[in-house]
């Protein structure tokens, strides 16, 4: 499996706990499914997702820190080398 750099957001929304979803909604003032709605802003939602994800590994990670991250979509990541896992 390929390591993800610390400054790249890589999150599986299906891995969120209910409490994390509530916190994301509190931080953004929007439901989580707003992420999939074309007419809703995405920046604050992405920042909240990054904050929740990164805070799991680093409790000192802040919401402001999350704003400095880059986003990597699954399709833009290089495929793992076969047998490299």
Image: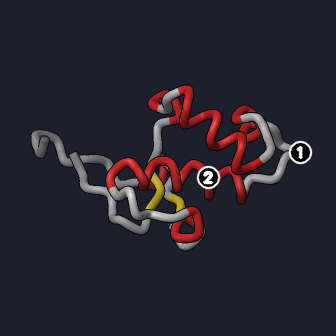
Q: Position of residue 57 (x, y in %)?
A: 32, 52
Quadrant of the frame with the N terminus: top left
Q: Quadrant of residue 39?
A: top right
Mark 1, secondary structure of its residue: loop
Mark 2: few, some, or many residues within 10 Å (few <14, many ≥20)?
many
Mark 2, secondary structure of its residue: helix
Q: Position of residue 41 (x, y in %)?
A: 81, 53
Mark 1: few, some, or many residues within 10 Å (few <14, many ≥20)?
few
Q: Position of residue 3 (x, y in %)?
A: 25, 55
Residue drawn at x 13%, y 41% as measured from the top left: 85
Residue drawn at x 50%, y 32% as measured from the top left: 16
Extreme residue in the bottom direction: 68
Q: Is residue 19 above or below residue 9?
A: above
Mark 2 vs 1, N-terminal side: 1
Q: Position of residue 24 (x, y in %)?
A: 64, 43
Label disc, if present, on residue 48 of the rendered structure: 2
Q: Tell me: 77 left or right of 2.
A: right
Are discs 2 and 1 less than 8 Å apart at CB? no
Label disc, if present, on residue 6 of the rendered structure: none
Extreme residue in the right direction: 39
Q: Nearer the viewer, residue 82 or 51?
A: 51
Residue drawn at x 70%, y 50% as measured from the top left: 27
């Amino acid at each position: 499996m390929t390591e993800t750099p610390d400054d790249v957001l890589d999150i599986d929304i299906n891995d969120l706990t209910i409490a994390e979803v509530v916190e994301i909604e509190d931080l953004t003032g929007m439901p989580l499914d707003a992420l999939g709605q074309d007419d809703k802003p995405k920046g604050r939602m992405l920042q909240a997702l990054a904050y929740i994800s990164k805070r799991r590994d680093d409790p000192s990670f802040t919401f402001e820190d999350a704003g400095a991250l880059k986003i990597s979509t699954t399709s833009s990541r290089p495929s793992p080398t076969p047998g490299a896992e």
